[in-house]
Image (cartoon, helix red, strand yellow):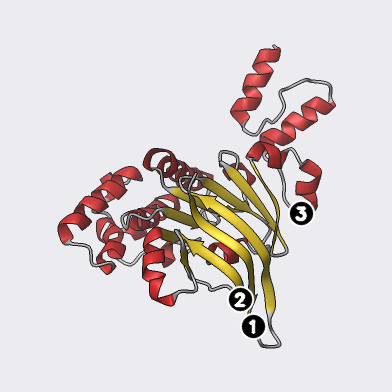
Amino acid sequence: MEKLIEVKELTFIYNRGTKKAVKALQNVNLEIMRGEFLTILGQNGSGKSTLARHFNGLLTPSKGEVYVDGISVKNQSQLREIRKRVGMVFQNPDNQLVSTVVEEDVAFGSENLGIPPDEIRQRVAWALEALNMTEYRKESPHQLSGGQKQRVAIAGVLATRPDCIVLDEPTALLDPLGRKEVIDAAKKLNREEGITVVLITHFMNEAIESDRIVVMDGGEIKLIGTPGNIFDQVDLIRTLGLDIPMATQIAIGLRQKGIKVADHILAAEELVNSLCQLL
């Protein structure tokens, strides 16, 4: 697979050179592949959002390098090109909505890139269709549900045709239905449109269908692997202040009671299938 984002010995210090200096990242190394769905997990303050903000040049390394499609984020003259390749969606959708009509809001980013109007209309229609939001194109974004607002925000980034979308805790303020809408949309963009997705979250169940998971703590990467490999390390995950998916917890409890369910269970459907096979 082709590398899209490469992080080399990245260190980042907030308020560098002052008495309030805080080292948020230390010697981080990571490669994100084109077309991958990567989830970054960690407690608050672990450095996951700070790392994500380097992927499109919102932050510049204190030490080390971050490359996007071979372009260094330290190269200020290339930030426009970097941000064409990597779009970001943040926690609160209300902070990202700028228009009173959904389709105008989705068009906003493309207009700023100077894209011709005819092409913008095509992009907006495509992005809304991809996010299952076409029927709301004439609505006011502020009258939508939280999950729908976040899908509008994602559509606005998608319309700029990025190679990668970084979702920085996009479901933190949403109810369970809204969270499901947003995660399902992210998975669809990755699988059907081939867009690289980087999901920053602290919800374990959102991570289970990723290609890889990165676990951060104290500004460092502690674990990298497939969901199965990561959540098999139950004791280590818990020492890092994280939990494991509910289906995995139930499977562990069943095994402790002598019920031989399958290994590497992450989702409720897998647990149900395993129990049905035993019956």
Q: Amino acid at mark 2?
A: Ser
Q: Are marks 2 and 1 in contact (CB under 8 Å)?
A: yes
Task: Compare marks 3 and 2 and give the one earlier in the sequence.
Answer: 2
Frontmost residue, 277 versus 173: 277
Report the residue marked by disc 1: 16
Q: Is residue 132 visible?
A: no
Callout 3: 10 Å neighbours few (<14), some, many (20+)?
A: some
Residues under numbered marks 3 and 2 in contact, where contact means CB atoms less than 8 Å apart: no
* Quadrant for the C terminus in the image: top right
Residue 207: tell me if it is visible. yes
Task: State how far apart marks 3 and 2 are (Cα).
Answer: 26 Å
Is label 3 in a helix, a strand or a loop?
Answer: loop
Query: Label 2, on which residue?
Result: 62
Q: Residue at x 57, y 73 (%)?
A: 61
Q: How many marks?
A: 3
Q: What mark, if any, has residue 185 been given in the picture? A: none
- Give the quarter of the image for residue 110: bottom left
Mark earlier in primary sequence (2, 1): 1
Counting other residues with Cα less than 10 Å from the Cα at mark 2, is it few (<14), some (14-19), or many (20 or more)? some
Under circle 1, the secondary element is loop
Q: Which residue is mark 3?
A: 240
